[in-house]
């Protein structure tokens, strides 16, 4: 953890759509150590792919931001990390057995790499623990959202087809030839959807080849026909089976798909 100058960045949400049967993003590698390319930027960490089989893993970390960053890897199994008073992760409170490795002082435009042998199946946290100080102002990169989960799968388990399927309903009249976009987002990610699909009418959908993880499911009528993020005038809905106004989480694990992830669209 280091002290530097604070910085501000604007993130843009962009939607990438595909067919009703999509493949997981990220290339498949056959090397002895599976490469994972990670980009660091104010204030995001983006690994590609986000899930690998257990075994040797080579992290190639590139800083595409404007200030120095770092990447710390710990096994979290999806549990919250201990925090210090300034909003950074209290690394001293993390058991040594859960600490995997890190790269520090990655300057803008530079890359660093490290290889971990024998990564075991589980959920890992990737985060930047840099703390900036400007006068009396303290800015912890972790508190700004610079963290994400990374999944290591059981290499002995045969690859299985993971699907999310359900139905989209809409009682209104706004469809009129416009497409319905279904967006599946990883929990905590504010960037582009991890997976997406389009429908030309209400009804059943299936999205295939989804990596294990925790997701939210959103659908909307693309009135602007621009394949962009949902606008204020577009009918929208989330997977919310208890109808409490909060999107429920969809968990995929062990290569098992989920069914009946239904979304009801409403005019706004």
Image (cartoon, helix red, strand yellow):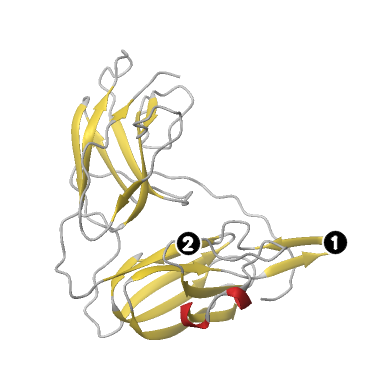
Cα–Cα gap, marks 1 and 2? 31 Å
According to the picture, the residue beneath numbered tag 1 turns out to be: 136
Residue at image point 40% right, 85% down: 115
- In the image, 59 versus 150, the foreground residue is 150
Q: Is 100 located above or below residue 189 in the figure?
A: below
Q: Left or right: where does residue 188 sit relative to residue 198?
A: right
Name which residue lies at 40% across and 18% down: 267
Q: Residues within 10 Å of mark 2 (few under 14, many from 20)?
A: few
Look at 25% across and 45% down and name the residue there: 18
Label 2 SS: loop
Q: Is residue 129 above or below residue 252?
A: below
- Figure label count: 2
Left or right: 30 in relation to 86: left
Does residue 126 appear in this view?
yes
Viewer-closest of 46 and 98:
98
Position of residue 138 relative to residue 61, above or below, is above
Looking at the rendering, in which quadrant would you find the C terminus?
Answer: top left
Q: Quadrant of the N terminus?
A: bottom right
> Where in the figure is residue 169, as x and y percent of width and height?
26, 23
Name which quarter of the figure residue 41 lies in.
bottom right
State the residue position of label 2: 79
Is residue 49 at least partly visible in the picture? no
Question: Which badge, 1 or 2, is on the more N-terminal residue?
Answer: 2
Instruction: Tell me where residue 12 appears, x and y as whole percent.
Output: 51, 47
Residue 201 appears in which quarter of the rendering?
top left
On residue 253, the disc is none
Nearer the observer: mark 1 or 2; the answer is 2
State the SS at label 1: loop
Q: Horizontal placement of 55 versus 149: left or right?
A: left
Point 28% across, 77% down: residue: 54
Tell me where residue 197 appears, x and y as whole percent.
26, 41
């Amino acid at each position: 953890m280091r002290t530097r100058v604070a910085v501000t960045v604007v993130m843009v949400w962009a939607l990438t759509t595909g067919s009703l049967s999509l493949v997981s993003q990220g290339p498949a590698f056959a090397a002895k150590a599976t490469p994972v390319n990670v980009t660091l930027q104010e204030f995001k960490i983006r690994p590609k792919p986000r899930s690998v089989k257990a075994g040797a893993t080579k992290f190639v970390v590139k800083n595409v931001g404007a200030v120095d960053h770092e990447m710390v890897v710990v096994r979290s199994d999806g549990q919250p990390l201990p925090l210090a008073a300034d909003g950074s992760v209290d690394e001293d409170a993390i058991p040594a057995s859960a600490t995997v490795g890190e790269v520090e002082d990655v300057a803008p435009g530079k890359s660093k790499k490290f290889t971990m042998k024998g990564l075991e199946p589980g959920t890992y946290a990737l985060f930047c623990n840099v703390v900036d100080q400007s006068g009396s102002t303290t800015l912890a990169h972790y508190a700004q959202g610079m963290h994400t989960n990374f999944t290591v799968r059981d290499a002995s388990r045969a690859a299985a087809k993971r699907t999310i399927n359900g139905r989209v309903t809409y009682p209104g009249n706004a469809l009129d030839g416009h497409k319905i976009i279904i967006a599946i987002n990883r929990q905590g990610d504010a960037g582009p959807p991890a997976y997406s699909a389009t429908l030309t009418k209400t009804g059943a959908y299936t999205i295939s080849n989804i990596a294990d993880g925790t997701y939210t499911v959103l659908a909307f009528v693309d009135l602007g026909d621009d394949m962009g993020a949902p606008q204020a005038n577009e009918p929208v809905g989330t997977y919310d089976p208890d109808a409490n106004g909060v999107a429920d989480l969809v968990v995929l694990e062990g290569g098992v798909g989920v069914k009946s992830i239904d979304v009801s669209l409403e005019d706004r």
